[in-house]
Amino acid sequence: MRGRKRDVTIGRAKKFAERQGYRWVPNPDTDMPFDALVYRANDMFIVSIRTSRNAPGEYDLPENFFRNDFQILTALPFPPYLPREVWVRYSWSRNFHRFRIFRDTFVAITMIDREKPLFEPRVRGAGTPSETKTPPGDEVK
């Protein structure tokens, strides 16, 4: 996939990663066949982004369905302990489906995709305790 659609999908994947709390570092070397290095506190991995018209069937294994990506990611010259993932966005869906490579198989990883962060950061020293926001559902009745 080349051109504008590819750039749009990469941009959406970056936003998806940021909503999950990850930092996105785009691939600086066009000769290396991956899209980004993604990291947060204790998690870092290489990611490849794909768009697909068809989803694997009930009896299709993801490592066979995405065989090309599987072979490319496992052959990258990175340390073997650095995980690799394929994020797939099907043409009929708005969500990304994450597949992480473990040894010789893909494992689907489920992430909740929220538009806003789950918790709002509190600013220390701003206002009195009565002015600080309480999370929904924690109100005293």
Image: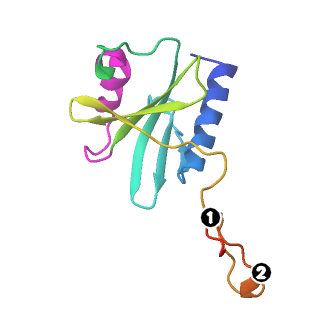
Disc 1 residue type (three-letter) = Gly
Can you say which quadrant of the picture contains the C terminus? bottom right
Residue nearer the viewer, 23 or 113: 113
- Residue at coordinates 58% horizontally, 36% vertically from top-left? 13
Q: Is residue 64 left or right of residue 27?
A: left
> Where's residue 24, x and y in %?
55, 47
Closer to the eye: label 2 or 1: 1
Q: What residue sits right under mark 1 in the picture?
A: 137
Instruction: Identify the amino acid type marked 2.
Output: Glu
- Vertical placement of 119 versus 38: above or below? below
Question: 120 or 96: nearer the eye?
Answer: 120
Tell me the crowding category of disc 2: few under 14, some 14 to 19, or many 20 or more residues within 10 angstroms, Cα based.
Answer: few
As drawn, the residue found furthest toward the front would be 141
Give how far across and how far down residue 54 sits, in percent. 48, 11
Q: CA distance from mark 2 to mark 1?
A: 17 Å
How far from the left and from the top, in percent, is residue 60?
A: 31, 14
Tell me if residue 70 is in the magenta stretch.
yes
On screen, residue 44 versus residue 120, left or right, reads left
> Mark 1 or mark 2, which is nearer the start of the sequence?
2
Q: Which residue is mark 2?
A: 131
Numbered disc 1: secondary structure = loop
Which residues make up the magenta segment? 64-82
